[in-house]
Amino acid sequence: MQNQEIKAIILDINTRWDAAFNSKQPAQVAALYDNDATVLPAGAAQVSGAAAILDFWTNTIAQGIIDHKIEMLEVGVDGNLAFQRGLWSAAVVNAEGQRQTFSGNLHVLYRRQADGSWKALTHIWN
């Protein structure tokens, strides 16, 4: 697989991830992760496995985070593993109606699934 192919695949995953998150669909977000995946949130405990990842995204989305966006900076692929290095941004509106934005870096390691699709195996951000 060439980098252009994996770039298109991961851009599609990013689009689906942001759409699911922003439409408050945590099950759709969680479905983009490998069954053995681990999410490593900045400043918090690691979250591993499908059920725990679904709970994590359900709770995170319930906090009122909006307008999530992933920006890809670099991708690569080697066999059944691929990576993405990029940026993320999101916002929240507080009780007074003031919008606060926040952003950071992200890194995602993907694993090719038996059906040929790709899912996140490790997702870390700060």
Image (spheres, rainbow, N blue to C red):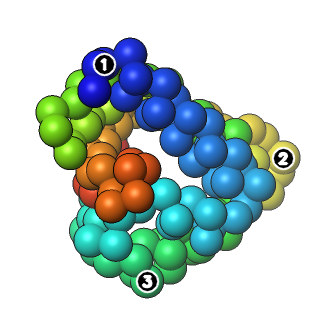
Where in the figure is residue 17, as x and y percent of width and height? 58, 47
**Relative side of 61 to 120, left or right:** right
Residue nearest the viewer, comparing 27 with 117 = 117
Q: Quadrant of residue 20?
A: bottom right
Does dot 3 land on a helix, a strand or a loop?
helix
The residue that mark 1 highlights is 3
The amino acid type found where label 1 is placed reads: Asn
Marks 1, 2: nearer the viewer: 1
The amino acid type found where label 2 is placed reads: Gly
Q: Earlier along the polypeptide chain: callout 3 or callout 2?
A: 3
- The answer to whether 85 is drawn above or below residue 108 in the figure is above
Q: Earlier along the polypeptide chain: callout 1 or callout 3?
A: 1
Does dot 1 land on a helix, a strand or a loop?
helix
Residue nearest the viewer, comparing 72 with 43 = 72
Where in the figure is residue 125, as x and y percent of width and height? 33, 44
CA neighbours of label 2 inside 10 A, class few (<14), some (14 to 19), many (20+) = few
Give the CA separation, mark 1 to mark 3: 32 Å
Q: Is residue 39 among the parts visible in the rendering?
A: no
Marks 1, 3: nearer the viewer: 1
The residue that mark 3 highlights is 51
